[in-house]
Image: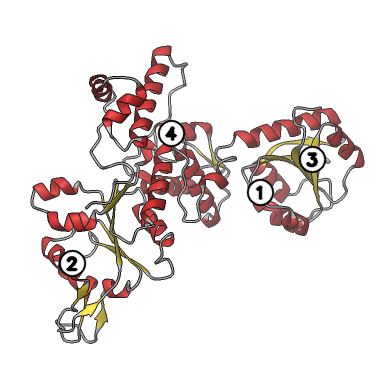
Amino acid sequence: MSAYANRPLLYLSQHHDATLCRLFAQRGWKISFASNLQDLQALPSGNQPLAALLDLQGGFGDAELEAFEPWLAQRHVGWIGIVSGQHALSETARRLLGLYFVDYHTAPLEHPRLAEALGHALGMARLRPGAHETLRTARPDGMIGSCPAMQSLFRGIEKVSRWDTPVLISGESGTGKELAAQAIHRASARASRPFIAVNCAAIPPTLLMSELFGYERGAFTGATKRKPGRIEMAQGGTLFLDEIGDMPIESQTSLLRFLETGRIERLGGTESIEVDVRIISATHVDLEAAIAAERFRGDLYHRLCVLRVRQPPLRERGSDILLIAEHVLDTVRKQSPARIRGFSPLALRAIQLHSWPGNVRELINRIRHAAAMCEDGVIQPDDLELATPADDRPLTLAAIREAAEQNAIVEALQRHHERLIDVAAELGISRVTLFRLMRDYKLQVKKGDLGLICVQG
Protein backbone atom coordinates (compact mmCIF):
# COMPACT_ATOMS: atom_id res chain seq x y z
CA MET A 1 0.00 0.00 0.00
CA SER A 2 1.24 3.51 -0.83
CA ALA A 3 2.51 5.97 1.75
CA TYR A 4 -0.52 8.06 0.76
CA ALA A 5 -3.05 5.34 1.60
CA ASN A 6 -6.49 6.73 2.37
CA ARG A 7 -5.32 10.27 1.70
CA PRO A 8 -7.97 12.48 0.06
CA LEU A 9 -7.92 13.31 -3.63
CA LEU A 10 -10.33 15.61 -5.45
CA TYR A 11 -10.80 14.83 -9.15
CA LEU A 12 -12.47 17.75 -10.99
CA SER A 13 -13.29 16.89 -14.60
CA GLN A 14 -16.24 16.72 -16.97
CA HIS A 15 -15.01 13.34 -18.26
CA HIS A 16 -13.43 11.20 -15.54
CA ASP A 17 -10.74 8.85 -16.88
CA ALA A 18 -11.54 5.32 -15.66
CA THR A 19 -7.93 4.20 -16.11
CA LEU A 20 -6.69 7.04 -13.95
CA CYS A 21 -9.31 6.30 -11.31
CA ARG A 22 -8.18 2.65 -11.08
CA LEU A 23 -4.56 3.78 -10.77
CA PHE A 24 -5.41 6.19 -7.96
CA ALA A 25 -7.43 3.57 -6.10
CA GLN A 26 -4.62 1.03 -6.41
CA ARG A 27 -2.23 3.56 -4.91
CA GLY A 28 -4.50 4.04 -1.93
CA TRP A 29 -6.10 7.39 -2.72
CA LYS A 30 -9.62 8.13 -1.48
CA ILE A 31 -11.25 9.93 -4.44
CA SER A 32 -13.99 12.57 -4.42
CA PHE A 33 -15.43 13.41 -7.85
CA ALA A 34 -16.75 16.74 -9.13
CA SER A 35 -17.86 17.80 -12.59
CA ASN A 36 -19.10 21.35 -11.95
CA LEU A 37 -19.46 24.13 -9.40
CA GLN A 38 -22.52 22.51 -7.80
CA ASP A 39 -20.57 19.29 -7.18
CA LEU A 40 -17.80 21.30 -5.49
CA GLN A 41 -20.28 23.12 -3.28
CA ALA A 42 -21.85 19.80 -2.27
CA LEU A 43 -18.54 18.33 -1.07
CA PRO A 44 -18.13 18.00 2.73
CA SER A 45 -16.39 21.04 4.19
CA GLY A 46 -13.03 20.49 5.81
CA ASN A 47 -9.55 21.88 6.20
CA GLN A 48 -7.35 18.80 6.08
CA PRO A 49 -4.65 18.95 3.37
CA LEU A 50 -5.52 17.17 0.15
CA ALA A 51 -4.35 16.79 -3.44
CA ALA A 52 -6.60 17.86 -6.32
CA LEU A 53 -6.58 17.19 -10.07
CA LEU A 54 -8.24 19.56 -12.56
CA ASP A 55 -8.68 18.35 -16.14
CA LEU A 56 -8.35 21.37 -18.47
CA GLN A 57 -8.57 19.35 -21.72
CA GLY A 58 -11.68 21.15 -22.95
CA GLY A 59 -15.11 21.15 -21.39
CA PHE A 60 -14.70 24.00 -18.89
CA GLY A 61 -15.27 27.54 -20.15
CA ASP A 62 -13.57 30.63 -18.74
CA ALA A 63 -16.65 31.58 -16.69
CA GLU A 64 -16.67 28.13 -15.04
CA LEU A 65 -12.93 28.29 -14.34
CA GLU A 66 -13.30 31.71 -12.71
CA ALA A 67 -16.13 30.30 -10.56
CA PHE A 68 -13.70 27.59 -9.37
CA GLU A 69 -11.15 30.18 -8.19
CA PRO A 70 -12.20 30.25 -4.50
CA TRP A 71 -11.53 26.49 -4.39
CA LEU A 72 -8.25 26.85 -6.29
CA ALA A 73 -7.04 29.50 -3.82
CA GLN A 74 -7.52 27.38 -0.70
CA ARG A 75 -4.08 26.86 0.79
CA HIS A 76 -4.78 23.39 2.17
CA VAL A 77 -5.25 22.03 -1.39
CA GLY A 78 -2.37 21.10 -3.72
CA TRP A 79 -3.59 21.36 -7.33
CA ILE A 80 -2.25 19.52 -10.39
CA GLY A 81 -3.55 20.36 -13.88
CA ILE A 82 -4.00 18.23 -16.99
CA VAL A 83 -3.73 20.16 -20.28
CA SER A 84 -3.79 19.14 -23.92
CA GLY A 85 -1.04 21.65 -24.74
CA GLN A 86 -0.02 25.17 -23.68
CA HIS A 87 -1.14 26.65 -27.00
CA ALA A 88 -4.69 25.40 -26.34
CA LEU A 89 -5.01 27.27 -23.01
CA SER A 90 -7.10 30.41 -22.66
CA GLU A 91 -5.72 33.45 -20.84
CA THR A 92 -7.96 32.62 -17.86
CA ALA A 93 -6.61 29.05 -17.67
CA ARG A 94 -3.01 30.32 -17.93
CA ARG A 95 -3.59 32.82 -15.13
CA LEU A 96 -5.12 30.24 -12.80
CA LEU A 97 -2.37 27.70 -13.51
CA GLY A 98 0.28 30.28 -12.69
CA LEU A 99 -1.40 31.46 -9.51
CA TYR A 100 -2.62 28.32 -7.80
CA PHE A 101 -1.16 25.10 -9.26
CA VAL A 102 1.78 23.11 -7.96
CA ASP A 103 2.33 21.57 -11.43
CA TYR A 104 0.60 20.59 -14.67
CA HIS A 105 0.94 17.62 -17.05
CA THR A 106 0.43 17.58 -20.81
CA ALA A 107 -1.46 14.80 -22.60
CA PRO A 108 -0.70 12.05 -23.42
CA LEU A 109 -0.20 11.37 -19.72
CA GLU A 110 2.47 9.28 -18.06
CA HIS A 111 0.32 7.79 -15.32
CA PRO A 112 3.10 6.92 -12.83
CA ARG A 113 4.53 10.45 -13.08
CA LEU A 114 1.08 11.96 -12.54
CA ALA A 115 0.52 9.82 -9.45
CA GLU A 116 3.89 10.91 -8.05
CA ALA A 117 3.04 14.56 -8.80
CA LEU A 118 -0.17 14.24 -6.80
CA GLY A 119 1.83 12.91 -3.87
CA HIS A 120 4.10 15.96 -4.17
CA ALA A 121 1.05 18.26 -4.31
CA LEU A 122 -0.29 16.72 -1.11
CA GLY A 123 3.07 17.21 0.55
CA MET A 124 3.15 20.87 -0.49
CA ALA A 125 -0.37 21.40 0.88
CA ARG A 126 0.73 19.95 4.20
CA LEU A 127 3.75 22.28 4.37
CA ARG A 128 1.84 25.52 3.79
CA PRO A 129 1.57 27.70 6.92
CA GLY A 130 -1.76 27.21 8.65
CA ALA A 131 -2.90 24.22 6.58
CA HIS A 132 -3.47 22.12 9.70
CA GLU A 133 -4.01 24.87 12.23
CA THR A 134 -6.69 27.19 10.92
CA LEU A 135 -9.74 25.34 12.18
CA ARG A 136 -8.12 24.32 15.44
CA THR A 137 -6.81 27.76 16.34
CA ALA A 138 -9.51 30.08 14.96
CA ARG A 139 -12.25 30.79 17.50
CA PRO A 140 -15.78 32.11 16.97
CA ASP A 141 -14.69 35.37 18.65
CA GLY A 142 -12.05 35.93 15.93
CA MET A 143 -9.03 35.28 18.16
CA ILE A 144 -6.33 33.01 16.76
CA GLY A 145 -3.60 31.16 18.60
CA SER A 146 -2.20 27.86 19.78
CA CYS A 147 0.94 29.04 21.60
CA PRO A 148 1.13 28.71 25.41
CA ALA A 149 0.64 32.46 25.91
CA MET A 150 -2.62 32.47 23.93
CA GLN A 151 -3.87 29.25 25.52
CA SER A 152 -3.29 30.92 28.90
CA LEU A 153 -5.31 33.92 27.70
CA PHE A 154 -8.15 31.68 26.46
CA ARG A 155 -8.28 29.92 29.84
CA GLY A 156 -8.32 33.29 31.58
CA ILE A 157 -11.19 34.52 29.38
CA GLU A 158 -13.17 31.36 30.15
CA LYS A 159 -12.68 31.80 33.89
CA VAL A 160 -13.42 35.51 34.21
CA SER A 161 -16.51 35.16 32.01
CA ARG A 162 -18.18 33.20 34.82
CA TRP A 163 -17.92 36.18 37.17
CA ASP A 164 -19.98 39.35 36.93
CA THR A 165 -17.19 41.56 38.26
CA PRO A 166 -14.89 44.15 36.65
CA VAL A 167 -11.97 42.89 34.54
CA LEU A 168 -8.75 44.68 33.59
CA ILE A 169 -7.01 43.58 30.37
CA SER A 170 -3.34 44.57 30.24
CA GLY A 171 -1.13 44.45 27.18
CA GLU A 172 0.82 46.53 24.69
CA SER A 173 -0.89 48.72 22.11
CA GLY A 174 -2.02 46.88 19.01
CA THR A 175 -2.41 43.43 20.60
CA GLY A 176 -6.19 43.27 20.18
CA LYS A 177 -7.43 43.90 23.71
CA GLU A 178 -10.91 44.81 22.47
CA LEU A 179 -11.21 41.34 20.90
CA ALA A 180 -10.51 39.83 24.32
CA ALA A 181 -13.12 42.11 25.90
CA GLN A 182 -15.71 41.07 23.32
CA ALA A 183 -14.86 37.41 23.93
CA ILE A 184 -15.44 37.85 27.68
CA HIS A 185 -18.77 39.59 27.02
CA ARG A 186 -19.99 36.92 24.58
CA ALA A 187 -19.14 34.13 27.00
CA SER A 188 -20.86 35.86 29.94
CA ALA A 189 -24.45 35.91 31.14
CA ARG A 190 -24.74 39.43 29.62
CA ALA A 191 -24.05 38.21 26.05
CA SER A 192 -27.54 39.12 24.79
CA ARG A 193 -27.23 42.69 26.06
CA PRO A 194 -25.21 45.61 24.55
CA PHE A 195 -21.41 45.77 24.34
CA ILE A 196 -20.44 49.45 24.30
CA ALA A 197 -16.80 50.47 23.75
CA VAL A 198 -15.21 53.80 24.68
CA ASN A 199 -11.62 54.71 23.79
CA CYS A 200 -10.65 57.03 26.62
CA ALA A 201 -7.55 58.22 24.76
CA ALA A 202 -9.43 59.17 21.59
CA ILE A 203 -12.01 61.50 23.19
CA PRO A 204 -10.88 65.00 24.26
CA PRO A 205 -10.96 65.42 28.07
CA THR A 206 -13.58 68.17 27.77
CA LEU A 207 -15.98 65.81 25.98
CA LEU A 208 -15.28 62.56 27.84
CA MET A 209 -17.72 63.28 30.67
CA SER A 210 -20.62 64.00 28.33
CA GLU A 211 -19.77 60.87 26.28
CA LEU A 212 -19.79 58.67 29.38
CA PHE A 213 -22.67 60.18 31.33
CA GLY A 214 -24.76 61.92 28.67
CA TYR A 215 -26.37 65.32 29.02
CA GLU A 216 -29.69 67.13 29.24
CA ARG A 217 -30.95 69.75 26.82
CA GLY A 218 -29.34 73.11 27.58
CA ALA A 219 -26.52 71.60 29.67
CA PHE A 220 -24.02 73.54 27.54
CA THR A 221 -23.88 75.48 24.28
CA GLY A 222 -24.95 73.19 21.47
CA ALA A 223 -26.85 70.75 23.70
CA THR A 224 -30.16 71.08 21.86
CA LYS A 225 -31.64 67.78 23.06
CA ARG A 226 -31.17 65.12 25.67
CA LYS A 227 -28.48 62.52 24.87
CA PRO A 228 -27.85 59.33 26.88
CA GLY A 229 -24.21 58.54 27.65
CA ARG A 230 -22.25 55.39 26.87
CA ILE A 231 -22.75 54.05 30.39
CA GLU A 232 -26.52 54.36 30.07
CA MET A 233 -26.45 52.83 26.57
CA ALA A 234 -24.74 49.72 28.00
CA GLN A 235 -27.65 49.06 30.40
CA GLY A 236 -27.71 45.36 31.26
CA GLY A 237 -24.59 44.66 29.22
CA THR A 238 -20.88 45.46 29.20
CA LEU A 239 -19.05 48.80 29.06
CA PHE A 240 -15.53 48.48 27.63
CA LEU A 241 -13.21 51.32 28.64
CA ASP A 242 -10.16 51.11 26.39
CA GLU A 243 -6.94 52.91 27.34
CA ILE A 244 -8.28 53.58 30.83
CA GLY A 245 -4.79 54.70 31.88
CA ASP A 246 -5.22 57.85 29.76
CA MET A 247 -8.43 58.95 31.47
CA PRO A 248 -8.16 62.43 33.08
CA ILE A 249 -8.19 62.54 36.89
CA GLU A 250 -11.49 64.48 37.03
CA SER A 251 -13.20 61.84 34.92
CA GLN A 252 -11.71 59.12 37.12
CA THR A 253 -13.45 60.64 40.13
CA SER A 254 -16.87 60.54 38.44
CA LEU A 255 -16.30 56.99 37.20
CA LEU A 256 -15.35 55.86 40.70
CA ARG A 257 -18.54 57.40 42.10
CA PHE A 258 -20.59 55.44 39.54
CA LEU A 259 -18.78 52.18 40.39
CA GLU A 260 -19.49 52.72 44.08
CA THR A 261 -23.16 53.69 43.76
CA GLY A 262 -24.31 52.13 40.48
CA ARG A 263 -26.02 55.43 39.63
CA ILE A 264 -25.28 58.31 37.23
CA GLU A 265 -26.54 61.83 36.57
CA ARG A 266 -26.54 63.29 33.07
CA LEU A 267 -24.68 66.58 32.72
CA GLY A 268 -27.07 69.43 33.42
CA GLY A 269 -29.59 67.08 35.04
CA THR A 270 -30.70 66.33 38.59
CA GLU A 271 -32.20 62.86 38.08
CA SER A 272 -30.24 59.95 39.54
CA ILE A 273 -30.37 57.00 37.12
CA GLU A 274 -29.61 53.45 38.19
CA VAL A 275 -27.48 51.57 35.65
CA ASP A 276 -26.53 47.89 35.76
CA VAL A 277 -23.40 47.29 33.64
CA ARG A 278 -20.25 45.24 33.86
CA ILE A 279 -17.02 47.17 33.38
CA ILE A 280 -14.17 45.74 31.34
CA SER A 281 -11.21 48.07 31.01
CA ALA A 282 -7.92 47.82 29.13
CA THR A 283 -4.61 49.64 29.21
CA HIS A 284 -1.07 49.53 27.91
CA VAL A 285 -0.02 51.82 30.78
CA ASP A 286 1.64 50.52 33.96
CA LEU A 287 -1.18 51.59 36.28
CA GLU A 288 0.79 50.90 39.46
CA ALA A 289 3.48 53.31 38.25
CA ALA A 290 0.77 55.80 37.27
CA ILE A 291 -0.66 55.58 40.80
CA ALA A 292 2.79 56.24 42.26
CA ALA A 293 3.09 59.28 39.96
CA GLU A 294 -0.41 60.42 41.04
CA ARG A 295 -1.74 60.18 37.47
CA PHE A 296 -4.22 57.44 38.35
CA ARG A 297 -6.39 56.95 41.41
CA GLY A 298 -5.47 53.94 43.49
CA ASP A 299 -9.05 53.43 44.71
CA LEU A 300 -10.32 53.38 41.11
CA TYR A 301 -7.60 50.88 40.16
CA HIS A 302 -8.76 48.47 42.85
CA ARG A 303 -12.36 48.84 41.69
CA LEU A 304 -11.42 48.07 38.08
CA CYS A 305 -8.82 45.38 38.68
CA VAL A 306 -10.88 42.72 40.46
CA LEU A 307 -9.99 40.17 37.79
CA ARG A 308 -7.13 40.56 35.34
CA VAL A 309 -5.97 38.96 32.10
CA ARG A 310 -2.96 39.73 29.96
CA GLN A 311 -2.95 40.02 26.16
CA PRO A 312 0.49 38.76 25.00
CA PRO A 313 2.50 40.80 22.49
CA LEU A 314 3.03 39.35 19.03
CA ARG A 315 6.72 38.62 19.60
CA GLU A 316 5.78 36.11 22.35
CA ARG A 317 3.46 34.11 20.11
CA GLY A 318 5.94 31.99 18.15
CA SER A 319 4.47 30.20 15.13
CA ASP A 320 1.12 31.94 15.74
CA ILE A 321 2.63 34.91 13.88
CA LEU A 322 2.49 33.00 10.58
CA LEU A 323 -1.07 31.83 11.26
CA ILE A 324 -2.18 35.41 11.88
CA ALA A 325 -0.30 36.63 8.78
CA GLU A 326 -2.06 34.04 6.59
CA HIS A 327 -5.43 34.94 8.17
CA VAL A 328 -4.86 38.65 7.51
CA LEU A 329 -3.77 37.94 3.93
CA ASP A 330 -6.94 35.91 3.32
CA THR A 331 -8.96 38.96 4.38
CA VAL A 332 -6.89 41.31 2.22
CA ARG A 333 -7.30 39.00 -0.82
CA LYS A 334 -11.07 39.53 -0.73
CA GLN A 335 -10.57 43.30 -1.01
CA SER A 336 -7.69 43.29 -3.49
CA PRO A 337 -8.24 44.12 -7.18
CA ALA A 338 -5.11 42.07 -7.97
CA ARG A 339 -4.49 38.35 -7.50
CA ILE A 340 -2.36 37.73 -4.41
CA ARG A 341 -0.68 34.31 -4.44
CA GLY A 342 0.91 34.49 -1.00
CA PHE A 343 4.16 35.06 0.88
CA SER A 344 7.53 34.02 -0.43
CA PRO A 345 9.66 31.82 1.88
CA LEU A 346 11.93 34.82 2.56
CA ALA A 347 8.91 36.95 3.48
CA LEU A 348 7.71 34.31 5.96
CA ARG A 349 11.20 34.20 7.47
CA ALA A 350 11.29 38.00 7.72
CA ILE A 351 7.91 37.98 9.48
CA GLN A 352 9.23 35.49 12.01
CA LEU A 353 12.41 37.49 12.68
CA HIS A 354 10.79 40.93 13.08
CA SER A 355 10.17 42.07 16.67
CA TRP A 356 6.73 43.63 15.88
CA PRO A 357 6.75 46.61 18.27
CA GLY A 358 3.35 47.61 16.85
CA ASN A 359 2.00 44.08 17.36
CA VAL A 360 -0.99 42.81 15.34
CA ARG A 361 -1.92 46.32 14.19
CA GLU A 362 1.54 46.71 12.62
CA LEU A 363 1.30 43.26 11.00
CA ILE A 364 -2.06 44.12 9.42
CA ASN A 365 -0.78 47.44 8.06
CA ARG A 366 2.38 45.90 6.60
CA ILE A 367 0.45 43.12 4.86
CA ARG A 368 -2.04 45.59 3.37
CA HIS A 369 0.85 47.68 2.06
CA ALA A 370 2.62 44.59 0.70
CA ALA A 371 -0.49 43.35 -1.11
CA ALA A 372 -0.64 46.64 -3.01
CA MET A 373 3.10 46.79 -3.78
CA CYS A 374 4.01 43.17 -4.58
CA GLU A 375 4.70 41.97 -8.13
CA ASP A 376 3.32 38.76 -9.68
CA GLY A 377 1.15 38.27 -6.60
CA VAL A 378 4.07 37.05 -4.43
CA ILE A 379 4.86 39.11 -1.31
CA GLN A 380 8.59 39.63 -0.67
CA PRO A 381 10.33 41.13 2.41
CA ASP A 382 10.75 44.48 0.59
CA ASP A 383 7.00 44.67 0.03
CA LEU A 384 6.53 44.32 3.79
CA GLU A 385 9.29 46.94 4.30
CA LEU A 386 11.23 44.36 6.31
CA ALA A 387 14.89 43.47 5.99
CA THR A 388 15.63 40.47 3.79
CA PRO A 389 16.90 37.70 6.08
CA ALA A 390 20.45 36.52 5.61
CA ASP A 391 21.01 32.98 4.39
CA ASP A 392 20.14 30.54 7.14
CA ARG A 393 23.11 28.86 8.71
CA PRO A 394 22.92 25.73 10.88
CA LEU A 395 22.59 26.59 14.55
CA THR A 396 25.37 25.55 16.88
CA LEU A 397 24.60 23.09 19.66
CA ALA A 398 25.09 25.87 22.21
CA ALA A 399 22.56 28.11 20.41
CA ILE A 400 20.01 25.28 20.28
CA ARG A 401 20.47 24.63 24.01
CA GLU A 402 20.08 28.33 24.86
CA ALA A 403 16.91 28.64 22.76
CA ALA A 404 15.38 25.55 24.40
CA GLU A 405 16.34 26.81 27.88
CA GLN A 406 14.85 30.24 27.28
CA ASN A 407 11.64 28.75 25.86
CA ALA A 408 11.31 26.39 28.84
CA ILE A 409 11.61 29.31 31.30
CA VAL A 410 9.08 31.48 29.41
CA GLU A 411 6.51 28.66 29.25
CA ALA A 412 7.02 27.78 32.94
CA LEU A 413 6.49 31.45 33.88
CA GLN A 414 3.23 31.45 31.94
CA ARG A 415 2.03 28.18 33.47
CA HIS A 416 2.73 29.32 37.02
CA HIS A 417 1.61 32.96 36.52
CA GLU A 418 5.14 34.19 37.40
CA ARG A 419 5.30 32.48 40.80
CA LEU A 420 9.08 32.15 40.73
CA ILE A 421 9.24 29.58 43.55
CA ASP A 422 7.00 27.22 41.57
CA VAL A 423 8.89 27.93 38.32
CA ALA A 424 12.25 27.08 39.92
CA ALA A 425 10.80 23.91 41.46
CA GLU A 426 9.37 22.71 38.14
CA LEU A 427 12.65 23.37 36.30
CA GLY A 428 14.70 21.71 39.04
CA ILE A 429 16.90 24.73 39.71
CA SER A 430 17.39 27.14 42.58
CA ARG A 431 15.78 30.58 42.62
CA VAL A 432 19.26 32.13 42.39
CA THR A 433 19.91 30.19 39.18
CA LEU A 434 16.47 31.16 37.84
CA PHE A 435 17.16 34.85 38.53
CA ARG A 436 20.53 34.57 36.75
CA LEU A 437 19.04 32.89 33.70
CA MET A 438 16.22 35.43 33.51
CA ARG A 439 18.78 38.21 33.64
CA ASP A 440 20.91 36.55 30.94
CA TYR A 441 17.91 36.12 28.64
CA LYS A 442 16.52 39.60 29.49
CA LEU A 443 13.24 38.15 30.75
CA GLN A 444 11.48 40.82 32.77
CA VAL A 445 8.36 39.96 34.70
CA LYS A 446 5.87 42.03 36.62
CA LYS A 447 3.87 40.42 39.34
CA GLY A 448 0.27 39.83 38.32
CA ASP A 449 0.89 40.52 34.65
CA LEU A 450 0.38 37.03 33.27
CA GLY A 451 -2.72 34.92 33.16
CA LEU A 452 -5.56 35.17 35.62
CA ILE A 453 -5.26 36.96 38.93
CA CYS A 454 -7.40 35.72 41.79
CA VAL A 455 -10.43 37.63 43.02
CA GLN A 456 -9.44 40.25 45.56
CA GLY A 457 -11.09 40.28 48.95
Residue contact between numbered discs 3 and 1, judged by CB atoms under 8 Å: no
Could you give the CA–CA distance between mark 3 and mark 2, rounded to whole angstroms? 65 Å
Please tell me the numbered disc located at residue 352: 4
Residue contact between numbered discs 4 and 2, judged by CB atoms under 8 Å: no
Q: Quick one: quadrant of the N terminus?
A: top right
> On the rendered structure, is 339 left or right of 453?
right
Q: Nearer the viewer, mark 4 or mark 3?
A: 3
Residue occupied by mark 1: 46
Could you give the CA–CA distance between mark 2 and mark 1, rounded to whole angstroms? 50 Å
Could you give the CA–CA distance between mark 3 and mark 1, rounded to whole angstroms? 15 Å
Secondary structure of the residue carrying tag 4 is helix
Residue occupied by mark 2: 260
Q: Nearer the viewer, residue 386 or 163?
A: 163
Please tell me the numbered disc located at residue 30: 3
N-terminal of the two: label 4 or label 1? 1
Measured as percent of width and height from the top left, residue 222 is found at 19, 83
* Type of amino acid under label 3: Lys
* Type of amino acid under label 2: Glu
Where 451 falls versus 277 (above or below)?
Answer: above
N-terminal of the two: label 4 or label 2? 2
